[in-house]
Image (cartoon, rainbow, N blue to C red):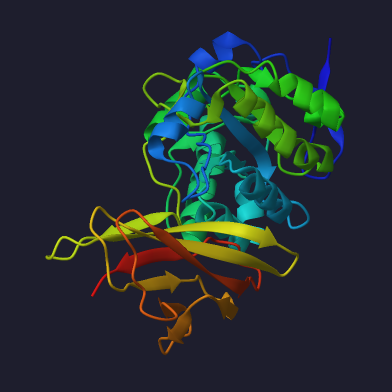
Amino acid sequence: MSRTAVTDAGRRIPRRGAAVTGALGLLSAAALALPLVVNAGTTSPAAAAADCAAGYVALTFDDGPNASTTTQVISALRSAGARATFFNQGNRVAANPSLARSQKDAGHWIGNHSYTHPHMTQLSQSQMTSEISQTQQAIQQATGQAPKLFRPPYGETNSTLKSVEQQFGLTEVLWSVDSQDWNGASTAQIVQAAGNLQAGGVILMHDGYQTTINAIPQIVANLKSRGLCTGMISPSTGRAVAPSDTPPGTTTTTTPPAGATCTATYRTTQQWGDRFNGEVTITAGSTAITSWTATVTVTSPQKISATWNGTPSWDSSGNVMTMKPNGNGNLAAGASTTFGFTVMANGQWANPAVSCRTP
């Protein structure tokens, strides 16, 4: 039976049976998809490991970035505490470089999904090379990093395409579960499809459907209830595994010579259409501290518009805030305190970077 998929213009075209939706697609694919982000300061590494006792799966989103939906996808993932892989089209990255940068700054991975979303197996080798090369360049220019992953449009691949991928050092990525969002699936149906994910699995979704955006919170909640976390896919095994990196804007610890330490952890507590509230928890190490100084760095053009529970100052750029305690700042060993602030996003939704030091 013929399948259909939505193209750039939103029209439906035949979707070939080469798109792999079963376990064989996963075994032939290798990709980075990404881990569940535990709000810093709320869950210990040991607790996070226990939460992921059943293993890891990968969320992936194709065909972006889209001016009307990408920011919503990023926001939904942030609110759900998840990260994902975005397989972007080169022409859309060229048209929306700031959105591609926002994906990266929010802690997500970006893969190559061709430049114009053609049926790659119908192209000559030189045309395949052009599609991949242009996209590598567009993403490199937008984010500062060239992709290491390639997902062929419609899941269509052959030996010629694989040889071109190898020339660029790209790992081909398919999927083990198809959400069918491209085929008009409802939010409930997308959530139901995600329920078929097993440890190591990869789900195909798309950046462009409100039904998919609406499904994200329930997908992540259901995964968590089954002891599964969103993780990266090992390029060597083609299976989702525990992440090997640290999400941006989480924890930085400074240890002064005297041995007294403090740790700063960040989490987003509220978000609106133009701004978000952040909270930083300062925690003393195994030795009591008499004071602390935290540094919060936002990404331009973000600006901090309000603060509470601390005494702030800024550098000349206005992007780096130094926060000191109201009062003496004494903290017993292992004790914590918090301060907060409002960030005007100005189109940039990256989490602030935080650090802490003691006198």
Q: Nearer the viewer, residue 330 or 96?
A: 330
Residue 127 lies left or right of residue 297; in this view the side is right
Q: Quadrant of residue 152?
A: top right
* Furthest residue toward bottom: 316
Q: Nearer the viewer, residue 189 or 50?
A: 50
Q: Quadrant of residue 98?
A: bottom right
Q: Nearer the viewer, residue 285 or 209?
A: 285
- Residue at 74% x, 58% y is 67
- Residue at 52% x, 43% y is 37
The percent coordinates of residue 313 (x first, y second) are: 44, 86
Whether residue 185 is visible, yes or no, is no
Residue 223 lies left or right of residue 109; in this view the side is right
* Furthest residue toward left: 257
Say above or below: 4 vs 249: above
The percent coordinates of residue 296 (x first, y second) are: 44, 71
Q: Nearer the viewer, residue 218 or 243?
A: 218
Residue 45 lies left or right of residue 177; in this view the side is left
The percent coordinates of residue 76 (x first, y second) are: 69, 47
Q: Quadrant of residue 3?
A: top right
Whether residue 238 is visible, yes or no, is yes
Say above or below: 50 vs 42: above
Indicate the quadrant containing the N terminus: top left, top right, bottom left or bottom right.
top right
Indicate the quadrant containing the C terminus: top left, top right, bottom left or bottom right.
bottom left
Total numbered labels placed on residues in the image: 0
